[in-house]
Amino acid sequence: MRQHKLALCKGHFLDWLVGQTQRFIHKYHMFSHEDNLLVSVSGGKDSLALWDILIRLGYKADGLYIGLGIEEGINYSSYSEQLCKEFASKYNTRLIVVNIAEQYGESIPQLALKSNRAKDKPCSVCGLIKRHVMNFVARESHYDVLLTGHNLDDEAAVLFGNTLYWKPGYLHRQWPVLEANRPGVIRKAKPLCRFYEKEMAAYTFLRGIKYIYEECPFASGAKSIYYKGFLNTLEANQPGTKLQFYLSFLQAKAGGLFAENADPEIEAIHACLSCGSPTSAPGECAFCRLVKTDH
Amino acid sequence: MRQHKLALCKGHFLDWLVGQTQRFIHKYHMFSHEDNLLVSVSGGKDSLALWDILIRLGYKADGLYIGLGIEEGINYSSYSEQLCKEFASKYNTRLIVVNIAEQYGESIPQLALKSNRAKDKPCSVCGLIKRHVMNFVARESHYDVLLTGHNLDDEAAVLFGNTLYWKPGYLHRQWPVLEANRPGVIRKAKPLCRFYEKEMAAYTFLRGIKYIYEECPFASGAKSIYYKGFLNTLEANQPGTKLQFYLSFLQAKAGGLFAENADPEIEAIHACLSCGSPTSAPGECAFCRLVKTDH
């Protein structure tokens, strides 16, 4: 691992990664062993690895799988659901499954077609719905913290996009843990945010975890993938750049770089009148308006 | 100009660029027609174009040429000095020439060899010396404002580098104009900071200004050139990205993104005991220590 100037054998690598995750959970005050955790799992390597690590660390962590109904290409949704179920039964742990089409009458691609957001790509609608369902399930089922498997490559790409356009709201909010300090908001954490994607790939491989290799069939051409490519070029030229970019941002922020009162968007958040989820829209949240419009 | 969704003929382009410069001078409160201006000219297109524009706009602008003694390759310094002198005599305007070797006993490459900074590349020493001489001459000759020809590509590359490492001090200081709010500091301004490099190249070409095409022979491999290449790729994929990156930074900053009291480096600046130039070092500035060590 040139980025850390470190070379480890299988056993030490697995210990190192689990130990580092514990360190990050402490460092960013994410959660404790008393908390009831809900891990959002997609069937991909990062979220299943996160669930695996949390179980090994002795945390009370259930899984949430959201069935998007994306059957383009390789039966993406069916296959990823099957992998999550296999993981849960192997570890004898609880998996909550929410099927969007069953719950709301239509799959993500169908909802996207009817929406004014992104006619050609369902990604924006998909993000909206997943955020809603994750929040809603975690809140209704009384979990303390919602966890996602975002890795360093994800976080650095988001940061790069937000920096390219200097979006104050997004720069203010990006952090390894998001507090539940507004109505309807559940505490969220990203324990893998400091691991390179290739480190997570190595972890799942060495642990023998079965996961879906394919990206979502709609992902090609996404901005995040474009930004990841850029950051990978910078990284190839100077190993450690990606980590440096993200960590120096966290350090600068913790050091008081940003003015505290500069996020009007956070201030405007309230609970949706229909579902209770956090929203900055007046009255009902974008999810409730989308689902109602479509029926 | 895809970045502005604008296409202009020669006459309108030249008027547009000069008019926009005037607009930026006003917008960022850079200087007025009463101020005595000193333009730092290198013989390159940006600084000579800036001088040309200021003269056309009726400002009182003299030039400062610093002879670095870099004769590698194409007699870089001699040729650029000659071009600056030709420009000044053609416009019948004053050019101050400071020859580093005559003034301080040794050329930039010689001083760099003796310094602990960058044994292989004189760029760091060169920057230190140029900043010192520009400040010193402007102050001693009672100019009100010191101007440099930095264009958008320069500023965006600097911003990119500072953002990649989230350097609070540099992020706080980057702005089209720097106030003279500390001992020994002269007011500085960059009126071309919102123009693409290719716009400046078009301006000098259309105005028939003779300038040195070659980069400094020591510039190859410089980080700024590497970052410029990156930004050019982003720009090619989405015209306007470079401008967007820089402008949204300025807007976010003006909108209060950064905390005001977060720049301890600025607070520590005082006047050098030997030359009176601004420095954060105790006692003497880095320039005075460099020149003394070397003799």
Image (spheres, coloured by chain):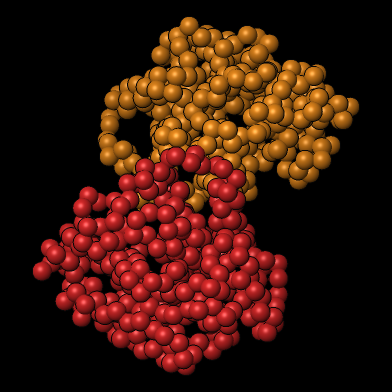
Chain colours: A red, B orange
Q: In which quadrant of the rendered image does the N terminus of chain A lie?
A: bottom right
Q: Is residue B203 visible?
A: yes
Residue that appears at 55% across and 35% down: B172
Q: Quadrant of residue A131?
A: bottom left
Residue that appears at 55% across and 38% down: B171
How far across and down, in percent of the image, does residue B165 sit? 59, 49
> In this view of the protein, which residue sits in the foreground, A181 or A171?
A181
Position of A200 with respect to B55 (left or right) is: right
How far across and down, in percent of the image, does residue B273 sit? 80, 19
The residue sitting at the top extreme is: B34
> In this view of the protein, which residue sits in the foreground, B74 or A235?
A235
Q: Quadrant of residue A93?
A: bottom left
Q: How many marks?
A: 0
Position of B131 with respect to B33 (left or right) is: right
> In this view of the protein, which residue sits in the foreground, A243 or A253?
A253
Position of B282 with respect to B32 (left or right) is: right
Residue that appears at 57% across and 86% down: A207
The residue sitting at the left extreme is: A295
> In this view of the protein, which residue sits in the foreground, A60 or B224?
A60
The residue sitting at the right extreme is: B295
Say above or below: B227 vs A190.
above
How far across and down, in percent of the image, does residue B157 sit? 52, 42
Position of A196 with respect to B70 (left or right) is: left
Say above or below: B273 vs A92.
above
Q: Is residue A195 visible?
A: no
Q: Quadrant of residue A217?
A: bottom left
Q: In which quadrant of the rendered image does the C terminus of chain A lie?
A: bottom left
Residue that appears at 82% across and 37% down: B115
How far across and down, in percent of the image, does residue B130 sit? 67, 27
